[in-house]
Amino acid sequence: MRTAVRKSVMSGRSTSESTTRLRFIADRRTTITLSSLFLGILVTPLAGAQVTPSAAKPISSESMAVHLTAKRPVAASATTPTPAASSAGISSSFNSEQGPGPGPIGPGPGCNLFPAPPSVGASVGLSYFGPPPSTTNPSLVGPVQLLNSGTVDAKNGTVTLPLYKGTLSGTKKTVWYILTDVDNPNVAAELGLNFSAKLTFASNAARTGNLDANGNIVFDKGTVNFAPNRAIVPGPSGAEFPPKSATPGAVGDANYSPFVRIVNAANVIYNAPMVAFDVDASQINFPNGNVDYSKVHDEVVAIDPINMTVTINLINGFSFGRPVWYLSMDTSTPLGAAIEHNTYAPLMGNLLLGHDDSFASPIERIFISTNGPESGGCNNPLRQGLSADLADGHRPNNVLGGIPTIALDYSPAWDAQLFEWTSDAINQGFRGQVREEFQILTFVQDGLITGPGGAAFGSSGFSINCPIVQRLD
């Protein structure tokens, strides 16, 4: 979709990519399937709903009825939870604190991407500005909530979503989870989830399951241990990344992935991250916050198993220059999971990486600076990167590829592309905050940015499950 443009910006794609493409194209049945899946998307105007019925995978009315059992009322928190890990960024131990860390409304411009109102610099008072154009066309300027099954708290930077209570086949142990994305546009529209066509190609990194009569998933396998204590020992000041050591706060077994293929409903694939496992409601009843992170996902701010809602921290980022809020739920490596405050999901390691925008790719790219500007911390409006994250506890302001309303190739499975500013770029004062992928790719082409340690720029070999929640402008 953007491949032709990228070829003009990037050079030196590996020969293995060409080999992979030829192998895929040789499979005629796969080619036909891809054509039917994407042709409708390509001809659909971006200004519309982004998909047409012709773009949908064929799904019977009986299968749709099964999916509709999973539909829940739009979730909203009954209380304002006590912010989790409120000392993060102040305490000297924030790299070993449990929980999500500080929210996206940070103490300075480098840790708060919320856009200024249109009245700034204008002679017209704020009350005279009409609704944003995005209320008419979601691709235009203005805030757009993309994950619509829950309620965003813009003041505290959280989202409250429906909580699901599934089971593990055989053992009957309880699986508490959320739904964020799905690879069928009609199911996405009915359940208020993000549609991701690319999830169709994530089946090799997905568990299987069946929806029961109550619309809850019975998973075939996959467990998570939420008991470990998250701990990171950063590197020296000014070069905190890579850390000296890192331990994730939640560890999945070899069979755990957030992605699940629903066998009894047309093999549709959901993104269903686990937030608690093998505990009853009384053990995770924290509707007002102060969550026990030995039992619950570190990104959870509050969880209410009585009203079946869960409130989760939002994270700042950019997509093609626009500030966004997203969730961070799982990572395919322990180091990434420790830094991301999320779950180590080994089965995600099966995802095909390094082939963004190529035939049958399940991923989209996320660009993560290792040594972006960090001096001044949150007071620095150009603050960005993993060293900054490990130095002050706030998130690194990562750059995402395509999201709904901006592009058509969104996937919640993000292929991590770590990048490093060269010494020459830093010495000449070129290092700053980057906000969109073609800007980054141009700097790579110009020799200002490389992979970590001067390596070739490209996939860093791990992926992160980061469902998009809201575009802020």
Image (cartoon, rainbow, N blue to C red):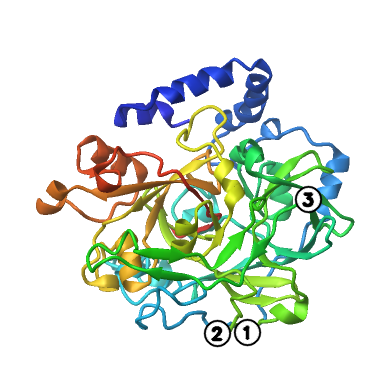
Q: Give the answer, above or below, for where 353 lies relative to 162.
A: above
Residue denoted by label 3: 220
Identify the residue at horizontal 47%, vertical 35% (top origin).
356
Q: Position of residue 43 (x, y in %)?
A: 57, 28
Describe residue 335's horizontal placement relative to residue 9 as left or right: right
Element on which disc 2 rests? loop
Element on which disc 1 rests? loop
> Mark 3 belongs to which amino acid?
Asp
Between disc 3 and disc 2, whose residue precedes?
2
Residue denoted by label 1: 288
Please say if the residues under marks 2 and 1 sit with CB atoms less than 8 Å apart: yes
> Mark 1 belongs to which amino acid?
Asn
Q: Position of residue 190 (x, y in %)?
A: 74, 51
Q: Quadrant of residue 6?
A: top left
Residue denoted by label 2: 82
Q: Is residue 124 visible?
A: no
> Mark 2 belongs to which amino acid?
Thr
